Image (cartoon, rainbow, N blue to C red):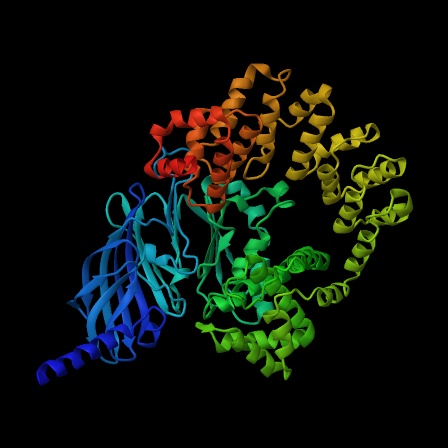
Amino acid sequence: MKKIFFSLIFLNAFLTQAQSITPQNQIEFVDFKKVNAEVSIYPELAKIDGNVNYSFDVLKEVDSFFVDTEDMTFEKVMLNRKETNFRLAEDKIWIKKKLTPSEENTLQLQYSGSPKQTMYFINWDKETSEEISKQVWTQGQGRYTSHWLPSFDDVREKAIFNLTINFKKDYQVIANGKLENERMLNDSIKQWSFSMKDPMSSYLVAIAAGDYKSKELQSAGGVPISLYYETKDENLVEPTYRYSKKIFDFLVEEIGVDFPWQNYKQIPVEDFLYGGMENTGTTIFSESMLTDSIGFKDRNYVNVNAHELAHQWFGDLVTEADGKHHWLQEGFATYYALLAEKQIFGEDYYYWKLYETAEQLKKLSDRGDGEALLNPKASSLTFYQKGAWALHILREQLGDETFKSGIKNYLKLYSFGNVSTEDFLKEMENVSGQDLSQFRKDWLEQSAFKANAALNSLEKSSFIRRYLDVAAVREQSVGIKYNVLNGALDFPVNDYVGQEAVIQLQGNTAQEAIDLYKKAFATGNVFVRQAIASSMKEIPQPLKSEFEDLLNDDSYLTKEYALLTLWTNFPQERSKYLTKTRNIHGFYDKNVRMLWLTLNLVTPEFDAGNSQTNYAELSGYTQTKYPCEIRQNAFSYLFQIDAFSDQNLKDLMQGTQHHTYRFRDFCRQLLKELLTYDKYLEKIQNISSSFSKKEWDYFQSQLK
């Protein structure tokens, strides 16, 4: 009996020790130092296999430890060069071995898998052509790198990642760090080897592969900058990456800490989930940001460019300890991006963006939906924009020099580590000698937005004061406010004040309004004229020629608005407007071209002989070979003219399972709408045998 009793005590002690390791506390027991990974990617099969070697220290005695991994098969598991026992849990591989405190332990994992997310294989099921981009790219987004690389979902576990990637020889592979070596493995496969010097969280590990070339720059401090592009997009390089070096050099000087990584790369990819992602030294961003010089005026990459670059310090160099402190990444990146844009576009732009976000935050707060910055479940608007506002207010409170000194101290003290809001505030208090408890209460802990304090700050700008004076007369008649609006349109007209004056004229055809419109047209300001194009729905005859001239503006938004409005207002001249805009495609999503094709199809007196060709083009843009932004635009216009073919409906069903959630949600909502029409319900049922299992299951769920 005594032997059994002591055996139970031993077993209980073993189980207690084994259970002491959890996803939350493993970092207290095991410290991973370096990860050397070789990954082979088979894009046509959407499969990978790899061999990963980890070096780690044991800080406290353990009976087991884990590495995060999703849906992988392991061919070899070796601990300290010996095969070892392991167990696969739902999202982890557990190494079952008692270890005492020690340094330089090793773990080797040989694995294979088919990533269901995080690594995306774009167009490898399509035939190669000039218009099709074949790419592979990753998006770790906080904790998902473990879907393609056994790694660590805990952002506090930082390690040095050295990647070796094996891929098809005719493509370019980009990853974190310095490219140390390229060599052929066989006639078709090439190997790229990258090294890192400093540790990072594994969600920042990234790979991109495609038909890429690069434009090479160097920062003022000598950091190599590579701006990648696909061969077909060579003409878009300059406007897309415009100001990249200026942004880089400004942020280094403004932050006061050298760029922390060996080099910096930017890679556009198709069907990206977001605007951009700040992988360490390797920003991946949406191809939809690509632009020419005309599109640059309306939609450009500058903000995302600066935002993701700022993350290289705020998020990559110092990383939040947990979600409660997410604003330390997104609020900071938003604020410093805004400072960079201020350098490029001017102080009025800076205050205008603050004003816009203050209006959004106030609206949220007024309806009782305000959120504290320290709420880990807060919205992006809170983390990004309220976070930026908090830093703007803090800088005003502390002064430029003190604020910059505090930021510099904070980054240097916590480099390559994890931080909390308390860490940040402590450094700012140390350098300023101020008690920031009230700031913390007002801007970090309070859910309501401090609208009055924001307004007081905004009114330090003479431009904002002028804008508010013009906005204050919105409810007055044109006759009463004529002098105010007339003054707002005086040369040189301010972009935002001029737009406000134009918006206040909407729907007014009195002679005073006509006179003001003529003055607004004559400003030549692209944004003021754009405001006319977007707000005027009925064109008075005295303004017809001026409105027609909007089709000549260097703005794809203006061209889109103007074409539709002119087509609607002057049916007898539709052919003239369609002829003039025949060869304009517009933004990445082909906004002008899609509108032109649609108007062409509902204008039988124009180009009737090519109607089938034009329908085929519009209908063809829903195909899966096109980026989701183009497909969504095509779906929208086909819905408006009630012209879905069976193939369009098949493409729509595919879209309901797309990895880009915004496009997926759009397709699901459109499908839901179509199913309310008997003819489309019948058509979709007739083609349902062609659906994949996921599409079929989703379709059945909608029928229920």
Q: Is residue 549 rendered to the left or right of residue 217?
A: right
- The one nearer the camera, 249 or 650, is 650
Tally of numbered discs: 0
Task: Specify the quadrant that holds the N terminus.
Answer: bottom left
| Residue at the image point whose x is 57% and y is 72% from the top | 256
Task: Specify the quadrant that holds the C terminus.
Answer: top left
* Quadrant position of residue 346: bottom right
Q: Is residue 30 rendered to the left or right of residue 82?
A: right
Q: Is residue 421 rendered to the left or right of residue 351?
A: left
Q: Is residue 1 above or below residue 368?
A: below
Where residue 179 sits in the image (x, y, percent)?
A: 37, 58
Q: Is residue 24 above or below residue 270?
A: below
Where residue 453 sits in the image (x, y, percent)?
A: 72, 68
Q: Is residue 597 above or below residue 433?
A: above
Q: Is residue 624 visible?
A: no
Where residue 158 sits in the image (x, y, percent)?
A: 38, 69
| Residue at the image point whose x is 80% and y is 46% from the top | 501
| Residue at the image point whose x is 50% and y is 42% from the top | 234
Where residue 642 sits in the image (x, y, percent)?
A: 54, 25
Q: Is residue 250 above or below residue 633?
A: below
Q: Is residue 464 visible?
A: yes
